[in-house]
């Protein structure tokens, strides 16, 4: 069995992987996805302790994936502060609770943006594969 690493911060995987910002993640089951990050296949699951990444060890997490997922950036704290100042933002943050903005490879982001012109999400996914 391969190593895994659990980061004690929860993200809503469907809100993060199915919102149109990325196209290389596939839903395996509820709260369980497989995707490609920096050329490596990665499994991500929501578990009671936080977010589980596999295969993974703490060193790889710290050097590669912590930034990709934005872990440790106090996003929820910033959202609460902004939500207190604007009702529209409050409603938006409540709707998409747990959404994380991924720090993707710039080249992949550019290519998927170009492919997105006059296309829909399922077609973009098939083009990226």
Image (cartoon, rainbow, N blue to C red):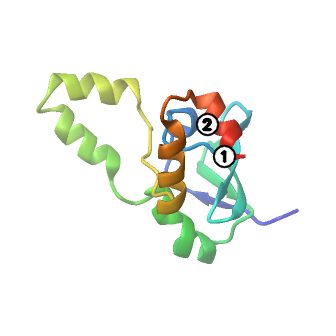
Query: Which residue appears at 24% of the width and 47% of the height?
Result: 78
x, y percent for residue 43: 72, 52
Look at the numbered discs 1 and 2 and tell me whether their residues touch, using CB distance below 8 Å: yes
x, y percent for residue 25: 66, 44
Total marks placed: 2
Quarter occupied by residue 87: top left
- Callout 1 environment at 10 Å: few (<14), some (14 to 19), or many (20+)? few
Residue at disc 1, secondary structure: helix
Q: As drawn, is 33 to the left or to the right of 94? A: right
Query: Which residue appears at 49% of the width and 55% of the height?
Result: 69
Res 8 seen here: no
Q: Residue furthest right?
A: 1
Query: Looking at the rendering, in which quadrant would you find the N terminus?
Result: bottom right
Q: Is residue 63 above or below residue 45?
A: below
Q: Is residue 40 above or below residue 20?
A: below
- Mark on residue 70? none
Q: As drawn, is 53 to the left or to the right of 75? A: right
- Mark on residue 124? 2
Q: Nearer the viewer, residue 12 or 22?
A: 22
Q: As drawn, is 93 to the left or to the right of 20? A: left
| Separation of marks 1 and 2 at Cα, in angstroms | 6 Å
Q: Nearer the viewer, residue 101 or 113?
A: 113
Q: Nearer the viewer, residue 117 or 107?
A: 117
- Mark on residue 128? 1
Q: Is residue 89 above or below residue 61?
A: above
Quarter occupied by residue 58: bottom right
x, y percent for residue 20: 50, 35
Query: Which residue appears at 61% of the width and 36% of the height?
Result: 124
Q: Nearer the viewer, residue 16 or 8?
A: 16
Res 79 seen here: yes
Residue at disc 2, secondary structure: helix
Query: Which residue appears at 66% of the width and 36% of the height?
Result: 31
């Amino acid at each position: 069995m391969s190593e895994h690493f659990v980061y004690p911060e929860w993200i809503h995987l469907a809100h993060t992987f199915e919102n149109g910002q990325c196209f290389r993640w596939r839903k395996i089951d509820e709260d369980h996805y497989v995707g490609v990050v920096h050329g490596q296949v990665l499994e991500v699951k929501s578990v009671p302790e936080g977010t589980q990444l596999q295969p993974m060890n703490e060193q790889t997490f710290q050097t590669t994936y912590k930034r990709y997922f934005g872990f440790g950036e106090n996003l929820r704290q910033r959202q609460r502060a902004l939500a207190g100042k604007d009702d529209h933002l409050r409603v938006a943050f409540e709707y998409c609770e747990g959404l994380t903005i991924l720090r993707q490879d710039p080249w992949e982001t550019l290519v998927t943006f170009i492919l997105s012109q006059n296309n829909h999400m399922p077609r973009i996914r098939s083009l990226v594969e």
